[in-house]
Image (spheres, rainbow, N blue to C red):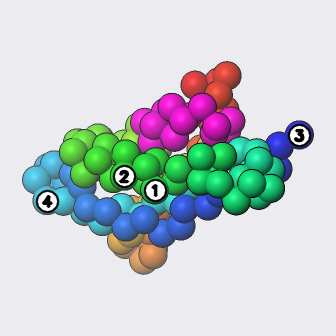
């Protein structure tokens, strides 16, 4: 049972997302949190970056995806982010949280959290 986790917290990006006319024109803030489930034992023992998940590379890929996308739904964005994370062979499972701050009146944010595993993409 794999219990090691790498967390990428509070990645704040701007993109076009939403179904309303103004959302299709004006970029909005999106807050992303990722949990990458992997086995960190080899990296922990060797202290060698070659044995570790390159979370900098994954983060850059997520940024590129989000900043160039024009999704209608946060659910679709989360699913596509999960696919990017699972392209790394060391990532067995990922939890993706995507929030739209201020999307609904009287709320701090609204969002979705999904989990995807290598065999359930």
Graded by Cα atoms within 10 Å as few (under 14), some (14 to 19) or many (20 or more), the crowding at tag 2 reads few
CB under 8 Å between callouts 3 and 1? no
Mark 2 sits on what residue? 60
Q: Which mark is residue 26?
A: 4
Dot 3 or dot 2: first in sequence order is: 3
Marks 3, 4: nearer the viewer: 3
Alpha-carbon span between mark 3 and mark 2: 29 Å
Marks 1, 4: nearer the viewer: 1
The x and y percentages for residue 103 are 35, 64
> Is 13 placed left or right of 84 in the picture?
left
The magenta span reads 80-93
Q: Nearer the viewer, residue 86 or 50?
A: 50
At horizontal 66% and vertical 46% (from top left) the residue drawn is 51
Alpha-carbon span between mark 1 and mark 2: 6 Å
At horizontal 53% and vertical 67% (from top left) the residue drawn is 9
CB under 8 Å between callouts 4 and 2? no
CB under 8 Å between callouts 1 and 4? no
Dot 3 or dot 4: first in sequence order is: 3
CB under 8 Å between callouts 3 and 2? no
Q: Which mark is residue 23?
A: none
């Amino acid at each position: 049972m794999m219990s090691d986790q790498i967390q990428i917290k509070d990645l704040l990006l701007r993109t076009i997302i939403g179904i309303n006319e103004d959302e299709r024109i004006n970029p909005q803030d999106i807050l992303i949190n990722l949990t990458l489930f992997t086995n960190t034992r080899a990296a922990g023992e060797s202290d060698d970056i070659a044995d570790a998940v390159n979370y900098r590379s994954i983060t850059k890929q997520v940024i590129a995806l989000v900043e160039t996308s024009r999704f209608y739904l946060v659910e679709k964005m989360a699913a596509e982010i999960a696919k990017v994370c699972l392209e790394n062979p060391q990532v067995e499972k990922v939890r993706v949280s995507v929030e739209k701050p201020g999307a609904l009146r009287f709320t701090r944010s609204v969002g979705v959290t999904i989990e995807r595993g290598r065999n359930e993409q």
